């Protein structure tokens, strides 16, 4: 199946120009959507005087979808840059994620069953696909489309790997390798690369991400994998699932995560991937004021009405952050190393500048008076981003009305979420789907660099690309060299590692040697003496296998770096000199901690290290429950089970020392999980006022795991709840339609 040619014209609309903002943004030609009221046409930009809990009049607001050429005019971008649409419907539809292959083609995961109506019917039907888009003439616009994989269940993430494409699907953790042996752009066979298991739960709470990191592991939200001989061998992250939708990396191998439901654009970026992730609150990793989005779209469709009504319904909290990437291109040096995170509910993309503040990295809004990219268009829904092979920044826009999965989009009842449904239905938003655009951000004064064709280059040719100023090109060269396992280039890599004037090149050359199994003690010792601290820190990381093997020369060199170490180097020493590697290193860690008593991360990490030893003794069910809790419950109940406050009001009851858990009242606990709970508990009201039912999204095994985690972690349980106990209660209440009230639950014991 192939598509070529011109896009279709969709609509012709009337526009008015919005005044340009006073700070350093350029509006490509921002327009205000036209709203139609019963009394006649009026500008949509007029302030609304109706709070979220009042009934909207019919046609209070109404607006229509825009063709790409018009939609792009509603999008703000930084001064000195402009957007170009590289693909749009019908060439691409519902682009939930995408990635470039080694020759610059784009693989797109099309979610053709995602919320195609207000009830989210048939979402698991196998009618979705992965499409391959190619720019055949080099003009930056995709002009050839083939359906690479058809009739599959909500493809989540893709990673091209020379002669195969790794793909993860919804409802399972297995990773497949797809092949196109005849080169026609259509997969003709597949095999299992990693044998996983069935995975239930909400489709927004399943695994995501496939990223080749500096350490030659492939990372997703749940695990990191080593690739060898066509198979992936996985090991779980230290804290279960670490990100919700998307995962990114930087030049030093740090991993950047996000939570959509948790409203966190970037987190857990303190250490390189593979090390335990310390739990930091938002205010510990984010600068003051960072967590307030500066949206300009005046459409109130966030779940719980978190809008500033005195300021034209502007969104006041992050609600769906996802699909982040780190910009690593010398085409955009001002943004190098910054993190871009789409926010589809806010119709914006937040850019974060990561600053090193005395050994702890903190995210700052790169544009304190605005956002990196944002739009007034109600249907602008950016969900994924990538740094491209041409040096440009790319993102996908699902361009649709509903961006909320059905669990959080009820259409009956009196809850605030139902009133949101009624509003967006009146506004015509339910009818807008099956669109999709991919944009790239381009400097006004520079041309995108030519896209290199790297897939079939020799290893010797690939080594040259390790000196590129574009991180995507360096990553791809490293990936292909390690994938090919051609040790004949070890000498060329050593020359780069020791002689290149470029810090990033020396670092990636060392890790490429590691991936080939050619890194020796001499390489490490020389790197430990490098003039750049980043290289020395990376060398300590690379020294770990030699420390484990008892290499006394390497150990002496590493231990000799303790005196005079900077905060960053000292932290790496603590990470690498783990007691798990050698028992006596516990004393060394304590010595380093004493020398750096004011270090912002070291005490937390050492405490986490002790906690990991404790958790390693937990049973499999509790560990699985931890993963579910961190994905589903953490936003309202908190990392510590003590509850989360917003405006001094708990969003949900604390689970630590919970009355139902402390008294082992499984009858009440399971009823709440299956059917939900609504209303106050005693005299106390909670933020949302409702817990939604989990019965349709989570099976008996998963709910048993979740109950066991909460019970064992915070409530002193010793016994394990079995899935059969959950099933018995599920069968008992299967015909109930409404959530429970506290009074009904209290009456169970009478």
Image (spheres, rainbow, N blue to C red):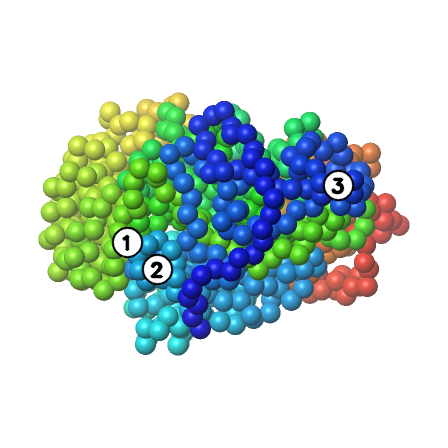
Q: Give the residue at mark 2.
A: 135
Residue in the picture at 31% in, 51% down = 389
Residue in the picture at 26% in, 27% down = 565
Q: Can residue 62 be seen in this view?
A: yes
Left/right placement of residue 188 relative to residue 215 reads: right
35 in relation to 571, above or below: below
Q: Give the residue at mark 1.
A: 451
- Mark 1 vs mark 2, foreground winner is 2
Left/right placement of residue 700 relative to residue 334 reads: right
- In the rendered image, residue 68, in percent from the top left (x then y), is placed at 50, 51
Of residues 109 and 249, the one drawn nearer to the viewer in this rendering: 109
Residue in the picture at 35% in, 53% down = 140
- In the rendered image, residue 203, in percent from the top left (x then y), is placed at 58, 58
Q: Is mark 1 on a helix, strand or loop?
A: loop
Q: Can residue 661 be seen in this view?
A: no
- In the rendered image, residue 655, in percent from the top left (x then y), is placed at 67, 42
Q: Whole-Å distance between the Cαs marked 3 and 2?
A: 45 Å
- Mark 1 vs mark 3, foreground winner is 3
- In the rendered image, residue 602, in percent from the top left (x then y), is placed at 40, 31
Left/right placement of residue 51 relative to residue 641 reads: right
Tag on residue 411? none
Q: Whole-Å distance between the Cαs marked 1 and 2?
A: 10 Å
Q: Give the residue at mark 3.
A: 40
């Amino acid at each position: 199946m192939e598509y070529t040619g011109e896009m279709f014209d969709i609509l012709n609309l009337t526009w008015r120009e919005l005044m340009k903002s006073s700070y350093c943004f350029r509006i490509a030609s921002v327009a205000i959507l036209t709203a139609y009221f019963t009394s006649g046409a009026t500008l949509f930009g007029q302030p609304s005087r109706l709070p979220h809990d009042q009934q909207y009049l019919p046609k209070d607001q109404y607006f229509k979808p825009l063709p790409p050429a018009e939609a792009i005019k509603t999008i703000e971008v930084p001064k000195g840059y402009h957007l170009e649409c590289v693909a749009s419907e019908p060439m691409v539809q519902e682009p939930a994620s995408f990635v470039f292959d080694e020759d610059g083609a784009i693989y797109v995961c099309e979610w053709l069953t995602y919320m195609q109506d207000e009830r989210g019917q048939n979402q698991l039907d196998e009618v979705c696909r992965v499409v391959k888009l190619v720019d055949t003439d080099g003009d930056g616009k995709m002009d050839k489309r083939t359906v690479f994989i058809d009739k599959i269940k909500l493809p989540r993430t893709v990673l091209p790997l020379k002669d195969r494409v790794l793909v993860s699907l919804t409802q399972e953790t297995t990773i497949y390798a797809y092949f196109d042996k005849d080169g026609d752009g259509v997969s003709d066979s597949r095999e299992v690369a990693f044998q996983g298991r069935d995975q239930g739960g909400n489709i927004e709470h399943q695994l995501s991400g496939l990223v080749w990191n500096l350490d030659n592991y492939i990372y997703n939200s749940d695990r990191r994998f080593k690739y060898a001989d066509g198979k992936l061998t996985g090991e779980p992250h230290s804290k279960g699932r670490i990100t919700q939708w998307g995962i990114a990396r930087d030049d030093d191998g740090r991993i950047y995560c996000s939570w959509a439901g948790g409203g966190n654009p970037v987190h857990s970026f303190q250490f390189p991937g593979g090390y335990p992730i310390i739990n930091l609150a938002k205010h510990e990793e984010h600068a003051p004021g960072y967590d307030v989005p500066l949206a300009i779209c005046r459409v109130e469709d966030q779940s719980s009405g978190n809008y500033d009504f005195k300021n034209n319904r502007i969104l006041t909290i992050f609600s769906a952050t996802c699909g982040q990437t780190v910009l690593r291109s010398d085409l955009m040096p001002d943004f190098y190393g910054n993190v871009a995170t789409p926010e589809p509910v806010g119709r914006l993309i937040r850019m974060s500048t990561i600053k090193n503040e005395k050994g702890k990295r903190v995210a700052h809004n790169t544009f304190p008076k605005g956002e990196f990219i944002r739009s007034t268009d109600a249907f602008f829904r950016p969900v994924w981003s990538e740094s491209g092979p041409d040096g440009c920044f790319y993102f996908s826009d699902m361009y649709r009305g509903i961006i909320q999965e059905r669990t959080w989009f009820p259409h009956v009842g009196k809850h605030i979420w139902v009133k949101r449904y009624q509003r967006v239905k009146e506004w015509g938003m339910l009818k807008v789907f099956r669109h999709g655009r991919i944009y790239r951000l381009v400097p006004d004064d520079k041309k995108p660099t030519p896209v290199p064709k790297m897939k079939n280059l020799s290893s010797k040719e690939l080594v040259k690309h390790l000196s590129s100023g574009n991180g995507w090109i360096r990553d791809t060269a490293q990936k292909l060299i390690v994938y090919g396992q051609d040790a004949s280039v070890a000498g060329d890599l050593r020359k780069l590692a020791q002689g290149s004037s470029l810090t990033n090149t020396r670092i990636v050359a060392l890790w490429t040697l590691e991936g080939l199994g050619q890194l020796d003690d001499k390489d490490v010792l020389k790197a430990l003496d490098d003039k750049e601290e980043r290289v020395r820190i990376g060398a300590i990381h690379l020294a770990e296998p030699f420390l484990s093997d008892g290499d006394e020369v390497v150990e002496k060199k590493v231990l000799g770096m303790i005196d005079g170490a900077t905060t960053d180097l000292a932290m790496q020493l603590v990470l690498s000199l783990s007691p798990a590697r050698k028992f006596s290193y516990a004393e060394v860690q304590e010595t380093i901690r004493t020398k750096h008593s004011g270090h912002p991360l070291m005490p937390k990490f050492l405490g986490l290290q002790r906690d990991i030893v404790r958790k390693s003794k937990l049973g499999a069910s509790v560990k699985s429950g931890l993963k579910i809790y961190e994905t589903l419950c953490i936003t309202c109940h908190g990392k510590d089970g003590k509850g989360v406050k917003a405006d001094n009001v708990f969003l949900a009851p604390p689970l630590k020392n919970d009355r139902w858990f402390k008294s082992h009242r499984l009858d009440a606990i399971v009823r709440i999980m299956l059917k939900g709970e609504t209303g106050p508990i005693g005299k106390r009201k909670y933020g949302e006022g409702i817990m939604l039912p989990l019965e349709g999204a989570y099976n008996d095994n998963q709910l048993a795991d979740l109950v066991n985690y909460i019970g064992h972690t915070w409530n002193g349980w010793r016994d394990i709840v079995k899935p059969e106990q959950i099933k018995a209660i599920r069968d008992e209440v299967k015909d109930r339609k409404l959530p429970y009230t506290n009074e009904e639950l209290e009456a169970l014991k009478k």
